[in-house]
Image: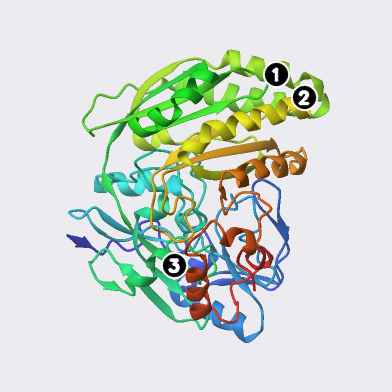
Amino acid sequence: MSGASKTVLGEGTGNSAGRRAGRGATNATGAVWRNWGRSEAVRPVRVERPASVGAVQRAVQAAARSGLPVKAIGAGHSFTGIALAPGVQLELSGLRGVLDHDVERHRVTLAAGTNLHQLPGLLAPLGLALPNMGDIDRQTIAGATSTGTHGTGGSFGGLATQIIGLSLVTANGELLHIGTNSAGVTANAELLPAARLGLGALGVIVDVTLQLVPTFVLQAVERPEPLYGVLANYLERSASEDHYEFYWFPHTESALTKTNTRLPADAALSPIPPVKRWVDDELVANGLYRVMCNLGKAVPSVIPRLSQLADKVTGTRDFTDLSPNVFVTNRTVRFREMEYALPREAVPAALAEVKALIEKKGWLISFPLEVRSAAADDNWLSTAYGRDTGYIAVHRFFREDPEEYFRAVEQIMIAHAGRPHWGKMHYRDAESLRTVYPRFDDFLAVRDRLDPDRVFGNAYLRRVLGD
């Protein structure tokens, strides 16, 4: 039954805004804001920290009156300029926690500024979990869904597919409810395929209602395998395994495969011992790898040997734990990323072309490529719209210039009808993107209706959506 569990973490927790009865805090002049990957930066005219939905509405109205664009930011984990706010920047950490829930229907309404890493603590007492997650959990729920965060699993959609309803502050400051809330009330359902994954272009999301699943356990098997066999079996394994992905380090001939199998909540747990987890994930995967990346930046010629070393120290692991503890990996080495979504059957050939390109160009690449999958969905700007999808992600250490590598890889992806992840680096524009999104113009029509004056616009949205 529905419970009015108002904001478990508290509106305004940890900042002065919450102590002012939801009025919100304002900085007259914003400091320079940078994203996590250090690929984008902006100095807002002002920063506001609303601690209530009403404060968000007033902030949007004030920005519109002053002729300033307004953007809500999440955790800064997008590598593109999608969240850059040269006008008014809304920082939504004052809007966190569970607002309502219906355990019987497995539905929860979350405030938009709730971070993914907070969800296990919020959902576990309700016996619920996200059906799927990515491997990074620093993002806010609204930021992750608005940019198309997806995780992996050939039969599972991205995070946005879990949204059954949301509330949006539109350009005139009105609160618009879209879809179904946790109490079962439905409104403006025709807008949901646009609003679930709206790039921040339609308004400021203040809450989302998710369709969740009962708590479950994952058995994880991680092991290195020959790359040629991994490519040959990718289509079969991505379709038959619950959650399957692999990483390939350039300059090697093997891949690290990760296979997660879903088990019921009462399955016996066999987690990684704390000391081993610290050694594997912190000392080696972050500490040692950071040293290797910095060494590769200083002396590029050692990168192939370092990649081969990384390949050798990657061992086999088999463990069973609650789903968030398996899905998520702590990542502290900064990087920049481009990820493309392809028709799933195109992935093996496309990756083979990237491998050949790296070898032909003699590029020295220290970061691995990541390959994942997702089921087709019906969100208009989803990278998996209308087709079973495979993903290829390329990365570079944040101290290295990625442009030559990324642009060349992008041409391979375009040749395979690729769609770029909205929150990761790419070089496409609206004219190009319209060719791979059948509902592109339908989305623009919704944008024209909800934000005709582009109150929520910025340079990135002008490039990818047009004026």
Q: Which residue is mark 2?
A: 295
- Image x and y of residue 364, in percent: 75, 27
Task: Kindly state the secondary structure of the residue where label 2 is placed.
Answer: helix
Q: Residue at x 35, y 57 (%)?
A: 8
Most foreground residue, 149 or 45: 149
The residue type indicated by label 1 comes to Leu
- Image x and y of residue 178, in percent: 36, 71
Instruction: Please state which of the two labelled residues, at mark 2 or mark 1, is closer to the viewer.
Output: 1
Structure colour scheme: rainbow
CA gap, disc 3 to disc 2? 43 Å
Marks 2 and 1 in Cβ contact (< 8 Å): yes
Q: Which residue is mark 3?
A: 206
Most foreground residue, 54 or 225: 225
Task: Kindly state the secondary structure of the residue where label 1 is placed.
Answer: helix
CA gap, disc 2 to disc 1? 9 Å
Instruction: Judge from the rendering whether residue 232 lies leftward or rightward of residue 208; answer left or right.
Output: right
- Image x and y of residue 453, in percent: 60, 81
CA gap, disc 3 to disc 1? 45 Å
